[in-house]
Image (cartoon, helix red, strand yellow):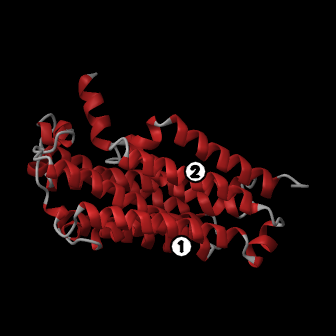
Amino acid sequence: MDRIKTYIRLFRFHQYVKNGFIWLPLFFSHRLSEVSVLKQTFWAFTAFCLASSCVYIVNDIKDINEDRQHPVKRFRPVASGLVKPAEALVYMGLLLFSSLAVGLLVHDREFLIIIVLYLTLNVAYSFFLKHLAIIDVVCIATGFALRVFAGGVAGDVRVSHWIIVMTFLLALFLALGKRRDDLMISLNGQGIRKSLDGYTPEFVNLGMGIMASVTIVAYILYTVSPEVIEEHGTDRLYLTGFWVIIGLFRYIQITFVFQRSGSPTSVLLKDVFLQSVIILWILTFFLLIYVPGN
């Protein structure tokens, strides 16, 4: 049983939350009731979950020495020695094969191209792009944008440029928060990581402030855009901006006041306040675009 738990930790199932972005095109296109589209999107989501686990294993093997110096990451299966690198490599291969096999169920060559691009980008990130300041966080944000594109392709949905822009901006904001946490740990003498070269607390703090501001402005512009109002049949989408602003402020509080922005996924899974805001945003948006008369 302990061995099984170790493998579960190796796959990082909790990180699958990130792949929820694949469902965004379906949500915004008013097609949640179409079974065939739901099925295709589900296969896309599954393929990306397998691919992301594959990427995490590659990263764990590559960064084994650095992770052993990290106060939290040193407990990961590979870094702690519970899973040998060669053994992890075998599981990585199985996950890679499974991801591409499931991807075939989407029945779209463009989707396979996207998932291969995602895998290639993340492998390149693990080996050298993560050591290039600014490029590293851009790679992370691009990965989220690729998820949205994949969801659009899988569901045969036109992906709005607004969704791509806001996804990229939000992901860039979260990536900078993660970099800030790593930087604080390094400055406290708990392991120096090469990926932090080119960053200072002031630079990251300013970057997060800028990205939060730009994200809010972009979202407001989206909600009042004539084409968006026409597409969704309501001019009250601006009301959902209230939750976006509160959510961003909460994450800023978590980052700067509570000093725990190292893992955006963990923050989301543990912070009830943030969970409530996201649920209320989804509910408000759903009522406005799916319920007649709103």
Q: Which residue is mark 2?
A: 246
Q: Nearer the viewer, residue 26 or 186?
A: 186
Disc 1 from disc 2: Cα separation:
20 Å
Point out the residue furthest to the right here: 293
Vertical placement of residue 121 versus 74, above or below: below
With 267 as the anchor, is 240 left or right in this view?
A: right
Residue 37 visible in the snapshot: no
Residue in view at x 12 percent, y 49 percent:
64
Q: Is residue 104 above or below residue 138?
A: above
Report whether 38 appears left or right of 18: right
* Quarter of the image with the C terminus in it: bottom right
Side of 15 relative to 243 (left or right): left
Q: Amino acid at mark 2?
A: Ile
Residue drawn at x 31%, y 70% is 121
Residue 11: x and y in percent read 32, 43
Which residue is disc 1 drawn over? 165
Q: Position of residue 170 (x, y in %)?
A: 48, 62
What is the tally of numbered marks visible in this picture?
2
